[in-house]
Image (cartoon, rainbow, N blue to C red):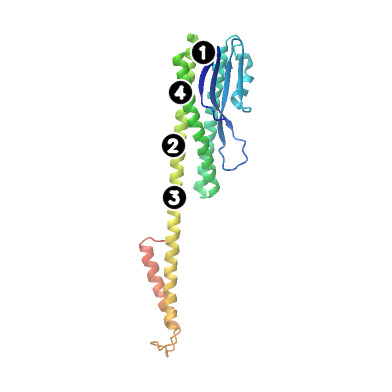
Amino acid sequence: MDERARFEEYDNVKLIVIKTPTENNSFNESDAYYITIPICIILTHNQIVTVNSFENGAIKKFLNTFQNRHHDKKNMMVLKVFEKITQTYMEYLKEINQRRNLMEQKLYASNRNEELLELMRIQKSMVYFVTALRSNEMLLLKLARTNFLGLTDEEKEFLDDLAVDMSQALEMANIYTNILSSTLDAFASIINNNMNLVLKRLTSITIILSLPALVTGIYGMNVPIPYADSHYAFYIPILLSIGISIIIGWYFMKKKWF
């Protein structure tokens, strides 16, 4: 599972390992939506063998286009596998971007942890994609530079086009990763700012409510108090409390604490 993209030759048998994307079937809700797995392509003098951990979309697409596989050209068949892998990356990147947009829209409506966890899973998928695409790009460029497969001029041109497509997929993955990182940072700042606003409002309310309690507490002490014998002794602390609350509330509104 952790094989890196590379190629080598031993006893006239050529080995190519390339990373391909696939959906993650893990039951852990914190894992990435998509991961990358290696596909091993072995070329003998008359056979092509592909080995992978489990079924994936790229190989299925290749097998479904059986009539276009150039049976007499092994190199072209290998390049077709590369093409399907690149197309699969493009499709998954578009799906990831759509999923990211959907989660962002939900986050605008309500800052829930569920959407943030979904974005984190998308971010993990992008880490897999960026790492694998960078490795694949280097593999294709090295194959073109060394002509490891002994390609014809037509096949070389096709490989160059695949290298360009792989580079484009890597650029898309980098762009989406940067957007996602910026989005998570922005929402983290928004959540912290909202928390600060809530704490500020709660503090303001606590202050407004504590001052009237102080006034009523003073008038409730069992000591001689001014106007204690007045007929309005009950209304004096109430009016003082209301007045102090109004003044403090007006001051806080002026300072935009609410």
Image quadrant where residue 41 sits: top right
Cα separation between marks 1 and 3: 53 Å
Query: Which mark's residue is nearer the viewer, 4 or 3?
Result: 4
Residue 50 located left or right of residue 258 = right
Residue at the spot 57% in from the left edge and 37% down from the top edge: 33
For the residues labelled 2 and 4, the Cα–Cα distance comes to 21 Å
Residue 187: assigned label: none
**N-terminal label among 2 and 4:** 4
Which residue is the site of mark 1? 149
Q: Which residue was labeled with disc 2?
A: 178
Task: Compute the Cα span from label 4 to label 3.
Answer: 39 Å
Q: Earlier in the sequence, mark 2 or mark 3?
A: 2
Q: Earlier in the sequence, mark 4 or mark 1?
A: 4
Percent across and percent down for residue 186 are 43, 45
Q: Which mark is residue 138?
A: 4
Query: Callout 2, which amino acid?
Result: Asn
Q: Could you tell me which secondary element the residue under label 2 belongs to?
A: helix
- Tell which tag, 2 or 3, sits nearer the viewer: 2
Q: Is residue 206 above or below residue 132?
A: below
Q: Is residue 23 above or below residue 246?
A: above
Other-residue count near label 4 (Cα within 10 Å), few / some / many at <14 / 14–19 / ≥20: some
